[in-house]
Image (tube, rainbow, N blue to C red):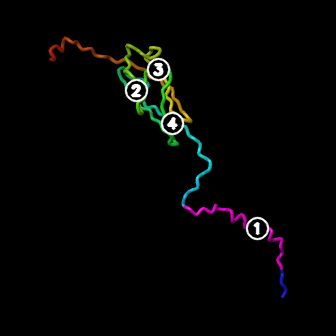
Amino acid sequence: MKYRVPYLGYLKFWPVCLFLTGCGGGGNDSDTAISDSMPSPNKSPTLTLDFATSLPENQIRIGKVIVNDPDGDAVSLTLSGDDSVFLNIKQDILLFKTAPDFEDPVDTDADNVFVFDVTASDGALSVSESVEIEVFNVIERKYDEAIFENDSLE
């Protein structure tokens, strides 16, 4: 019986095929996920202002400021602009520092319209909204002190 050697020309493709099949999968047998080497890009916080743009005089509370950061970063709120010195943010509530009086306007141009910007920042990205709040007059009752003499109604 004659021993026959196969044609060696076919064997030149075998090492390439074996190499390709041996490189797939990474060989990780653990249940832990492999993290991406590229971090996801930072996303800007969102800012929602929940209040009316026209408010009655003698009222301190303006409304709610709602912020959210899709990345879960801490978000800081700041007020800026000409009339921001008359305003304050406590927790998520926008307030006048003192209740505005229509008859005695304190805003910068004395027109009872407070103009300011609210900015939310996560330290890297920020979003800002310009706001105008008009304060309108309400009828204020004045009581006659003579009626209330001796703590009784006459």
**Amino acid on which disc 1 is placed:** Pro
Query: Which region is colored magenta?
Result: 5-30
C-alpha separation, residue under disc 4 versus residue under disc 3: 23 Å
C-alpha separation, residue under disc 3 versus residue under disc 1: 76 Å
**Amino acid on which disc 3 is placed:** Asp
Where is residue 94? Give x, y as percent.
Answer: 42, 28
**Direction from residue 68 to residue 140 in the image, left or right:** left
Residue occupying the point 56% across, 36% down: 124
Where is residue 112? Give x, y as percent.
Answer: 43, 17
**Direction from residue 50 to residue 142 in the image, left or right:** left
Residue occupying the point 80% across, 68% down: 12
- The residue identified by callout 3 is 83
In the image, is residue 28 part of the stretch drawn in magenta? yes
Please tell me which of labels 1 and 4 falls first in the chain. 1
Please tell me which of labels 2 and 4 falls first in the chain. 4
Disc 1 element: helix
- The residue identified by callout 1 is 15
- The residue identified by callout 4 is 46
C-alpha separation, residue under disc 2 versus residue under disc 4: 20 Å
Decide: marks 2, 4 in contact (CB < 8 A)? no
